[in-house]
Amino acid sequence: MSTAGRPRRGDGGQVSVRPVPGGPLLVRGADSVADPDGVEHAVERPVVAVCACARSQRLPWCDGTHRYVRRD
């Protein structure tokens, strides 16, 4: 997974993660997502976009920065 975003579900339910080519990770069913420092961020939507490029200004959430950065 990316440097940001460890999805968690407190009730043991299923969490799915789908990578978007050249974009974020779409996380469905999570209650929270941990950032690179281990801080838990509550999820308030059925599906959230988690940053996969580690350049977002809103980590762990995707802010679209991946569209403007050069890929190695």
Image (tube, rainbow, N blue to C red):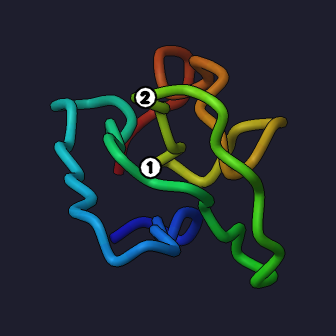
The numbered mark at residue 46 is: 2
Type of amino acid at the residue the image marks with label 1:
Ala
Residue occupying image coordinates x 23% and y 52%: 17
Q: Where 40 falls versus 26 (above or below)?
A: below
Figure check: 72 above or below 8: above
The amino acid marked with disc number 2 is Pro
- Say left or right for 40 vs 54: right
Q: Position of residue 63 (x, y in %)?
A: 66, 22
Can you tell which mark lies on residue 62? none
Q: Nearer the viewer, residue 33 or 55?
A: 33
Q: Residue at 83%, 36% (x, y): give it.
A: 57
2 and 1 marks in contact (CB < 8 Å) = no
Where is mark 1, residue-wise? 52
Q: Residue furthest bottom?
A: 38
Quick one: label 2 or label 1, which is nearer the N terminus? 2
Report the side of 47 relative to 39 (left or right): left
Residue at the spot x=32%, y=36% of the render? Answer: 26
| Residue that appears at 43% across and 73% down | 11
Question: Residue at the front extreme?
Answer: 11
